[in-house]
Image (tube, rainbow, N blue to C red):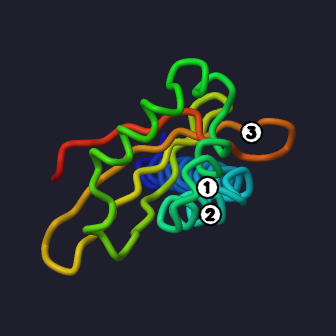
Amino acid sequence: MDWGLTRDIGTKALMAGAGALLLYWTISALKLVLSARGINPLIKQFFTQVASGQVDGAYLLTTKNYRSHVNRQQFIRFLAGLQLNKYRNLKSGRPRMEDKLIMLTVKLKSDGTEELPLDFTFVKVEEQWRVERITKLAAA
């Protein structure tokens, strides 16, 4: 076989592979974005209710599974331990998808340099997103 022909075939195979990988990545990213619609408004509603003292409303944005493991008093103690009144800004990270769950790291930022990363896990319940788990992460 001629070296030039081999090189042309290799180049075309490499380009086809790169094109397939790009197509796969685009489809995966589009699927993630479309399936995560509604999560940012839920986060905003969650923190708005907590900030306005409507802890019961925020608690009801969680799943029945979450509420079966974390009672209302534990939820209130968890929120109190976070000292949320120190933080003013919220930055949402890139969602991650695993099975039918969407994980999202949310960083709360103070006026100073303090940052509080929280890992939220969401699940769809009857076409509505609900909080399945909230975990406080170590500050980066």
The numbered mark, 2 or 3, whose residue comes first in the sequence reads 2
The kind of secondary structure element at disc 1 is helix
Q: Nearer the viewer, mark 2 or mark 1?
A: 2
The residue under label 1 is: 29
Q: Nearer the viewer, mark 1 or mark 3?
A: 3
Residue at the (36%, 75%) spot, across then down: 89
* Amino acid at circle 2: Gln
Q: Splitting the image into 4 quarters, where does residue 22 fall?
A: bottom right
Q: Nearer the viewer, mark 2 or mark 3?
A: 2
The residue under label 2 is: 45
The kind of secondary structure element at disc 2 is helix
Q: Which mark is residue 58?
A: none
Pick out the residue farthest to the bottom. Answer: 111
The kind of secondary structure element at disc 3 is strand
> In the image shown, does 124 or 29 lie closer to the viewer?
124
The numbered mark, 1 or 3, whose residue comes first in the sequence reads 1
**Location of residue 44 in the rendering, given as x and y in whole percent from the top left corner:** 57, 66
Q: Splitting the image into 4 quarters, where does residue 49 fall?
A: bottom right
**Location of residue 113 in the rendering, given as x and y in whole percent from the top left corner:** 13, 73
Q: Which mark is residue 124?
A: 3
Q: Is residue 63 above or below residue 49?
A: above
- C-beta proximity under 8 Å, tags 2 and 1: no
**Location of residue 100 in the rendering, given as x and y in whole percent from the top left corner:** 68, 32
> In the image shown, does 113 or 31 lie closer to the viewer?
113
Residue at the (40%, 70%) spot, across then down: 90
